[in-house]
Image (cartoon, helix red, strand yellow):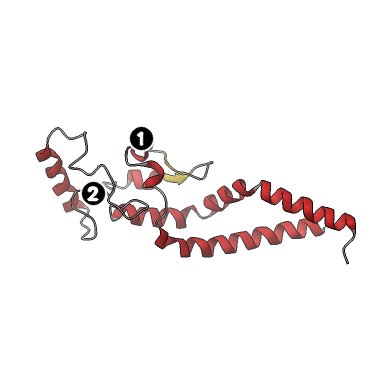
Amino acid sequence: MFSDEQINRYVDAIIRMISNAENISISFMTANADLILSHIKEQLWNGEDAFGNNISPSYLQDPYFNSAREARNYAVWKDNITPNPQRDFSSPNLFINGYFWNSLYIDETGEVNSHYLPEIITKYGGERTFSLQDKNYPDIEEAWETYFTNYLQENIISILS
């Protein structure tokens, strides 16, 4: 059986892991940033937020444009350079030349951020837009299981040493 000392070491290790849960989660997101960001970029390409709704403001609602005609012309131009039949005509996909998309990263808090134009993330809804849709969770859950299993194995080995 286990001695009191071994049980206390196991309990202490479990408490440390639980108290470190946020750091473990952020570490997972950083380690799997490519996977997470690829799903988010797919959503953006389709003009959708994390709930499957059109990204807002739409071009036709965006106060940046001086008139409905200007907004419509921009939407037509965007549709020509980034055609996607799955995206609503007036829904932004936040892609013109790839600079913004290529600047996306997972920051130290586990949030999606941009080196290029972080204000775009705020303008288009922050976490509402730059989080994963439910349909993407199976891929993420599989990566999490692998990551967490490895994490547990490493920590159990250190406990037993």
Q: Which residue is mark 1?
A: 119
Q: Amino acid at mark 2?
A: Ser
> From mark 1 to mark 2, how far is it between C-alphas?
18 Å
Which quadrant of the rendered structure holds the C terminus?
bottom right
Left or right: 93 as drawn, with respect to 6: left
Mark number, residue 10:
none
Label 1 Cα crowd, 10 Å radius (few <14 / some 14-19 / many 20+): few
Left or right: 65 as drawn, with respect to 118: left
Which one is nearer the viewer's eye here, 134 or 147? 134
Find numbered disc 1 in the image and state the secondary structure of the residue it sits on. helix
* Rendered location of residue 132, percent (x, y): 42, 54
Label 2 Cα crowd, 10 Å radius (few <14 / some 14-19 / many 20+): many
Q: Residue at x 29, y 48 (%)?
A: 55
Q: Residue at x 46, y 61 (%)?
A: 137
Q: Residue at x 71, y 58 (%)?
A: 154
Q: Are marks 1 and 2 in contact (CB under 8 Å)?
A: no
Q: Closer to the N terminus: mark 1 or mark 2?
A: 2
* Rendered location of residue 103, percent (x, y): 39, 44
Question: Which residue is most to the left?
Answer: 69
Q: Which residue is mark 2?
A: 91
* Rendered location of residue 20, percent (x, y): 66, 47
Foreground: disc 1 or disc 2: 2
